[in-house]
Image (cartoon, rainbow, N blue to C red):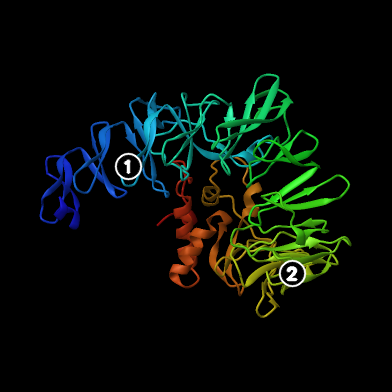
Amino acid sequence: MSMANAQELHVTSNGKGKMGVVDNDGNEVISCTWDEVTKWGRVYKVNKGKKYGLYGSAGQVLVPVEYSDISALNCWDRALICLGGKRMKNVNGRSYMLNGKYGIVNGDGKVLIPAEHKGLFEFAWSGSTAKMLAEGKWLGSYIHFVGDTLVTDCKYLGFGDKVFTNDCGILDGQTGKVLVPKGLYNLVMEPHDNMVRTYKWDKKQLTCGYYDIEKGIEITVSMISGSVKNVTDSNIKFWTHGDFTGDIAPVNNGETWRFIDKTGNTVRSGYNNIFFGRYAKIWVAKTSDGNVDFFDESNKPIEYLAGYKDIHFPQNETDDLVFPVKNVSNKWGVIDNSGQLLAEFDYDGAGYPTLNCVPVCKDGKWGSLDSKGKTIIPCNYVDFRLPIEINTRYFFVKKADNMYYVYDTVTQGEGTVGYVGASAFRRGLAWVRPNGIDVPDNNLNRGLMGITNGEFDKYKNEFGFIINAHDEVMFPELINAYYFTKASERIRQEGRALTKSEAKKELLEYSKKYRKYNLSDKIDEYNWDY
């Protein structure tokens, strides 16, 4: 098979309904005995009847043909495998394997997690959906439908004995090693810095804690009276405790915050408000009397921030580490992560740095600085749209007439056309809503909104046009902002503005899934996809 490995391989059929893989000389590498063969990652997926397996490019068996399902690979090169079970359908007609057991395989056909778990789940649900969790990721406990693709890198996985479970443990997604035994907790959060945030409850009390996955030690940090049925059905309406960042984690008793180390010892306390700069890796903790502490993930004070009353952190990983800070005189300036002053304390307010754009306010008017402290938009405006791409040249600024105008940061000039609504520029194009446009209630526009029945008027403000930075209309038909990316790509492909006919054809394509007509209807020219 060494020669076969060196040659290009081809999926083939023997003319009798069976498939296999051959090399350029026609030599069988995988015999033509399978109902179907497809290229799958760097190997081949085969099936006979309702059983699936994986073969290598040398014809070797990697995963025996005994699995009831092998999903598609995700972008992290991970797929779900299912052993056994009965194929069923839910009320929406989607298939799943009842009583199947699940595991994980990679694109080389290597089984990372054997198919031994009736419940195998990713940390895919946002903790922000529940007040008591507030952050992090918790297990997406749901039925695995045939055709679904995994949605994470599977670094950590929850495992248990049920399809829907509150009692999962945690596996290392690379080795299958048990990190947290199942059955210890009702809920576990995604591990951070080798510590797992845990929840255990009954009808009267919630026990909050952590599990040290290196030492196998449980730490209880609080016991809160209250009824908890599940994370979204609870009378506990505050964030109980947070994930570890480095050596410390925040814990809340319902009134004040404290910080603990990995042994459970309190290292700071007495705060009524806390927040964390994810990319700066700085904690900010405020007391009720106005004192503010700034410290890092090792609980070390940030000396260059001492004495400031407030700070705004960058919102994106690609942002330069510059921070608007408020001094004791309630004026805002901008510093870098060494404490060097980039912009004087001349401002009455500031926003969060976004893609190296630092919003600042003076005398009630807004503008922006760059990450070096240089003015890119003067403080002359009611508002402006934050960028969605780094170091953008064009912005929308809102003037006293409450209309948005294009602003060119190079020429420092304003456009002459005002819009009642506008999105930020992306690669020189933007979606805008002119004042007074008429949005007809027709099948096309309903289709673009994905609605077939009900009130349409409330959606009219979501329609507009696509323009370039010179206020030239590039998509001359009304379009919902949701389709901005698709339509913009078409404009870039053409290298010019679309004609009305071209734009209408795009809209008909976007909306075809939702457009419906009665058999007795006469379809007008505008809605006819000719």
State how many labels appear: 2
Disc 1 target residue: 110
Q: Residue at x 62, y 63 (%)?
A: 319
Label 1 and label 2: CA atoms lie apart by 51 Å
Quarter of image, res 455: top right
Disc 2 target residue: 340
- Sequence-first tag of 1 and 2: 1
Badge number at residue 381: none
Which is nearer the eye, 420 or 34? 34
Residue 101 located left or right of residue 203 = left
Quarter of image, res 255: top right
Residue 16 located left or right of residue 60 = left
| In the depicted structure, whether residue 196 falls above or below residue 202 | below
Q: Amino acid at mark 2?
A: Gln
- Mark 2: secondary structure: loop
Examine the rendering and report whether any part of residue 383 can be seen.
yes
Query: Callout 1: few (<14), some (14-19), or many (20+) C-alpha neighbours within 10 Å?
Result: some
In the rendering, at what x and y percent does residue 94 appear? 41, 32
Which is nearer the eye, 8 or 225? 225
Q: Amino acid at mark 1?
A: Lys
Examine the rendering and report whether any part of residue 501 can be seen.
no
Location of the C terminus by quadrant is: bottom left
In the rendering, at what x and y percent does residue 204 appear? 71, 19
Closer to the camera: disc 1 or disc 2? 2
